[in-house]
Structure formats: C-alpha cells, structure tokens
Amino acid sequence: MAEPVVNTDFYAPRFEIEIKGTAPLPTTAVISVDIDERIDRPGMFTLTLNEWLDIDTQTFTWLDSELVRPGNEVLILFGYNAKSRKFTGKIKALSPSFPSTGIPTLKVEGYDLSHGMQKTESKVKDTDVKYSDVAKEIARKNDLTTTGVEDTLKKHKVVKRNKNESDYALLDRLARNIGYEFFVRGKTLYFRSPKDNQSKSVSFRFRKNVISFSPRLSTTPTVNEVEVTAWNERSKKPIVATARISDIETSVGIPDFDKLVEKSEGKKIKIKREGRAVKSEDEAKILAIGELKRANDGFIGGTLDCIGNPDLAPGMSIEITGVGKNWFSGTYYVKGARHSLSDAGYTTTLDVRRCL
C-alpha cells in the first residue's frame, strides 16, 4: 500500500523575516523565532541568528550590518504555507554570543509598535470628548490605523495624571476606566470592549490537540459586588453605583458564578472603591463594572501548550474540554500567545482566563 502523502503546505512551519522592507533573510541564517503577544503589555519578538565572520575583512554578517540596528522595523510572517500571519515591530536590543567553540550567534529583540507609545506624549482634546476619539487621535499621531477603535458613545473630561503621562499610559488608563482593552497589532491600534462574551473560535480537547494544560482556580480575589462612590463634576455631590455579577456574566461564562463566589466565602462579598469625577450615574456604573471584572478575572486561569497555530492571538475566545466537568472545561479568553518556531518545530503557548 502506498504511503499517505503529507500536506507540507499546511504542516511544514515557515517564517519570513524582512527588515526595513528588504528581501527576506535567508532561512539558513535564522535559528529560531519567538513572538510573544499580550493584551496587557507590548508584544515582543526574539530572533536568534547564525553569525559568520569574514576572515579577510574581520566583519560579522549581521552584527556589523546596517540592517540589524536598533530602531529598524521588522516584519515577521509566520505559520504555514497555507495559513500564516504577520507581526510588525522594531528592534530594541542586540545580544551576541561568542562561544569558545561552535558558531557565534546574535539574538535580536524588539517590541510591537505600541512600545514606542511609552515614549510619546501627544496633546489631545481633553474636554467633552469621547475616549474613542482620544484613541483615534493618538493612533494617527503615532502613524497607526484606527480601524480597531470602537466608538465609546459617551463624552468625558480627560485629565492627564501628569504632564508627562505617555500615550501608552493614557490609553491604558482610559481603557481600564470603562472596561475596555487597548493593544496594537501590526499597524492597527485597538481600543475596544473585550470579546470574552463570544463563542469559541478554536476548540481544544485534552489528549486530542493539547500538548499540556495547567489551570489554577483561586477564590481569593473574587467578589459579588463592587460599590463605587464617584463625584458629580457639576453638582460636586457624590454618586454611588453598584455593579453585580449579573452585570458582567456572559452566555459562555461560568454557570451560577454569583452563588459559587458566595458559597466559597460563606457570604456575599462586597467591596467599595472611591471613583473619580463623573457626569452621571451611568458613568459611575461603568467604573464599577470595570472594577468588578478586574476583581474576578483571576478566578480560573492557566497555560495551554499546543501545536503551532498562527490564528491563535490575544483577544479571542477558545474552548477547552476533557479537563473535568465542574471547573476547568469551558470557554476561555486568550490574554497572551507565544509562538515559537525553530528546527524543532512550531508550538504555541496560550495564557488564558475562564470567561465569566
């Protein structure tokens, strides 16, 4: 019987690396590629390159090249021939290694384009403005597209914590205020509500397509209610708003989560927070909901290793089954995804939390 033909277009991992828009680096030059994308901080890439020393000129191929310099833009295409994705970043660090025996190597490290926003301080309209408009304005000033910005509808007064607050810190803070998430993917800035209320995009099952899964359940941070006391910026009177689990639970989340939290503590847990100046009770409620989400996000989390899949990225939901009926089987939100490609193959490691 003839041997089955392996579809190398799908199963053979591939990557291409372009620096400053040049032709891709030779595949023989690259030992490994690691891409670590996150929701809560700038994504990072690491390239490990083989080095060659020209005996006549005493120059190294990459270390002495103008191509491999801090600040140069890098485009990484990774995945498979039939399915791949792009990562865009800038070089920030170089780490050569000169062993006594063997071939020298050069480790090239960098971050996605949100990293540069930690050093920019844009002036933005700060009164009677929607947070989404602020996000779009900052995106344009950092040469990023705005297609990932969702309209926030309500208008606010935006006050910088200090005159030196960076664009990254400002957008991260504004996103937290209203329960949004902020990140950059490629050359697009995302400022949006979390997509943890959606059905899974990819399914995993223990002993089927999971290399390993290490979850953890902790009731330590969980609460049933958050009460926020804010101040009406016009009347200068307090506004009190309360968020309950019913305000944040989703159709793909944990059944009876409210009762579960109460039972684990022996009573309903309510915490109080002091808010900022707001215009309405609705705005104070948004603050309370954001605080409640953050308090309960750590209930169930974990790390999943699987065969490499370029479709896996932070900000999507996945389903994990076959890991028990009570707690750990269900829909999870991806907070981080690390893609590792080398001669040894292609694996993806996910940092996930259970959807509420």
Image: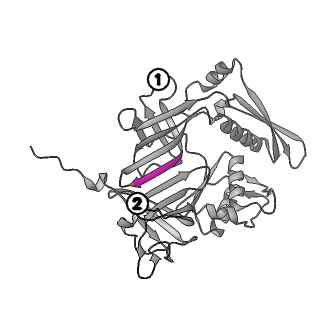
Quarter location, residue 127: bottom right
Residue at coordinates 47% horizontally, 66% vertically from top-left? 75
Residue 284 lies in the magenta-colored region: no
Residue at coordinates 69% horizontally, 47% vertically from top-left? 176
Residue located beneath label 2 in the image: 31
Secondary structure that dominates the magenta span: strand
Residue at coordinates 55% horizontally, 26% vertically from top-left? 255
Please state which amino acid type lies under the numbered disc 2: Ile
Residue located beneath label 1 in the image: 325
Tell me the quadrant of the picture where the C terminus can be found.
top right
Q: Is residue 91 left or right of residue 339?
A: right
Q: What is the magenta range?
A: 335-341
Q: Where is residue 352 shown, x and y percent of the image?
A: 53, 40
Circle 2: element type: strand
Answer whether residue 148 is visible to the viewer in this image. Answer: yes
Please state which amino acid type lies under the numbered disc 1: Lys
Q: Where is residue 308 shown, x and y percent of the image?
A: 39, 48
Q: Nearer the viewer, residue 244 or 234?
A: 244
Tell me the quadrant of the picture where the N terminus can be found.
top left
Q: Tag 1: Cα neighbours inside 10 Å, few (<14), some, or many (≥20)?
A: few
